[in-house]
């Protein structure tokens, strides 16, 4: 048998969340010898047990998965008035897995990779004395359950002898070529692919903000009446309103196969929506509003502590971070409501003093500021 390899070309596929690239290798073949016909319902192809010259350096194939619905066939062969199914001896995934185990030198100390057979299809038809073969193979490589890259091999062949020999050789060469291509790709890209299940989280409290209408909490800069710049909404029983909250932002990166999550927690006061009525512009009302902001600051510290204690993985880190934030927001709201209820919005002097003392001591003790 003789065949030639035509130049390959590369095109990019859709990439979220990881880069997926497709390489297309076209194998053009021409073989003309003798004529053979087929009559059985299923014709099996046995992969030759021949050593593959290339040995992967950076990974090994831990398992082989066949993705197609029809697990029994790899195409059809039509000729001499008969139509038969083509298949690999011993099953498609098992046959390729056995071939890899016996003929590819693999280092189990390297990265475990799953090889998915996304397509393995051969359409064989006889016209006159010539067999025509259309071949299409698609192998996809996965690491830690994530699809990384796929390679497609397509080709045509013509022959007047057994076409199964061409199919068998085509499969083995596609395997050999793709093992090498993935080895080269993985060597270049492996540091940016998250393979570790655990996510490392770095969390810190913000000291500044670039939002012009926000003030970040600071013990050294308590609120001033002039900070309340919002339009009064007309509620009769309130002399002032503090709008504060806890912002959470994060950025992720991958280093040495592990996702690194940098989380920033920001306790803030919103100047544009916080307001004072003229009758409330005094130190007593300001002290009540400052305590609202102090409660926000305490809850921000508690959120930082909760994030540091949590166990984040690739599968849960987005959802878990949201759950921690929502739980903290509810606890913060409950504390603010209780504060206003027990002090009657700061009008019960002894309760107001007691709350101010308790919250001031908590801010100092919590150690965030």
Image (cartoon, rainbow, N blue to C red):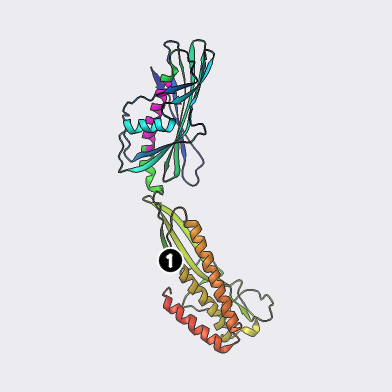
**Residue appearing at x 43%, y 66% in the figure:** 204
Element type at mark 1:
strand
How many badges with numbers are in the image?
Answer: 1
Q: Closest to the observer: 80 or 346?
A: 80
- The magenta stretch spans which residues? 166-182
The reply to whether residue 39 is visible in this rendering is yes
Location of residue 237 in the rendering, given as x and y in whole percent from the top left corner? 67, 81
Residue 169: x, y in percent? 39, 23
Q: Which residue lies furthest to the bottom in this view?
A: 350
Residue 26 is inside the magenta segment: no
Residue 287 lies, with reference to residue 34, above or below; the image says below
* Rendered position, 212 above or below 175: below
- Residue 183: quarter of image: top left
Residue 253: horizontal and vertical position, in percent? Answer: 43, 53
Secondary structure mostly seen in magenta is helix
| Closer to us: 46 or 161 | 46
Question: Residue 133: image x %, image y %?
Answer: 48, 20
Q: Does the magenta stretch include residue 175?
A: yes
> Going by the image, does 329 lie left or right of 88?
right
Residue at 45%, 55% (x, y): give it: 252
| Residue at the image position 53 percent from the left and 76 percent from the top | 293
Which residue is tagged 1?
A: 204
Q: Nearer the viewer, residue 215 or 249?
A: 249
Q: Can residue 210 be seen in this view?
A: no
Label 1: few (<14), some (14–19) or many (≥20) C-alpha neighbours in 10 Å: some
- Between 280 and 21, the residue placed more toward the observer is 21
- Position of 6 compared to 233: left or right? left
Quadrant that contains the C terminus:
bottom left
Q: Residue at x 43, y 60 (%)?
A: 262
The N terminus sits in image quarter: top left
């Amino acid at each position: 048998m003789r065949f030639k390899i035509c130049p390959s070309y590369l095109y990019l596929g859709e990439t979220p969340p990881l880069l997926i690239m497709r390489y297309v290798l076209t194998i053009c073949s021409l073989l003309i010898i003798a004529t053979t016909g087929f009559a059985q319902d299923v014709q099996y192809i046995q992969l030759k047990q021949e050593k593959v010259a290339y040995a992967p350096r950076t990974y090994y194939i831990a398992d082989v998965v066949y993705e197609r619905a029809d697990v029994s066939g790899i195409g059809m062969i039509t000729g001499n008035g008969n139509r038969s199914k083509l298949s690999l001896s011993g099953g498609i995934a098992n046959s390729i897995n056995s071939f890899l185990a016996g003929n590819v030198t693999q280092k189990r100390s390297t990265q475990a990779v799953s090889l998915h057979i996304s397509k393995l299809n051969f359409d064989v038809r006889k016209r006159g004395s010539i067999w025509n073969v259309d071949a299409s193979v698609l192998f996809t490589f996965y690491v830690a359950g994530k699809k990384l890259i796929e390679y497609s091999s397509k080709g045509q062949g013509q022959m007047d002898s057994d076409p199964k020999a061409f199919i068998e050789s085509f499969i083995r060469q596609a395997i050999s070529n793709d093992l090498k291509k993935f080895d080269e790709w993985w060597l270049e890209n492996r540091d940016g692919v998250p393979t570790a299940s655990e996510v490392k989280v770095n969390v810190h409290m913000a000291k500044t903000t670039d939002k012009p209408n926000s003030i970040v909490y600071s013990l050294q800069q308590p609120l001033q009446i002039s900070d309340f710049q919002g339009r009064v909404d007309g509620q009769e029983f309130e002399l002032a309103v503090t709008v504060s909250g806890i912002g959470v932002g994060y950025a992720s990166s991958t280093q040495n196969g592990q996702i690194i999550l940098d989380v920033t927690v920001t306790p803030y006061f919103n100047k544009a929506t916080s307001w004072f009525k003229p009758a409330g512009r005094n130190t007593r009302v300001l002290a009540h509003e400052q305590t609202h902001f102090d409660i926000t600051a305490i809850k921000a510290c508690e959120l930082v502590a909760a994030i540091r204690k949590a166990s984040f993985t690739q599968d849960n880190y987005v959802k878990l971070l949201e759950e921690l934030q929502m739980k903290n927001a509810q606890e913060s709201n409950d504390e603010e409501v209780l504060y206003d209820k027990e002090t009657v919005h700061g009008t019960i002097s002894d309760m107001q003093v007691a709350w101010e003392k308790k919250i001031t001591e908590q801010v100092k003790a919590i150690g965030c500021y």
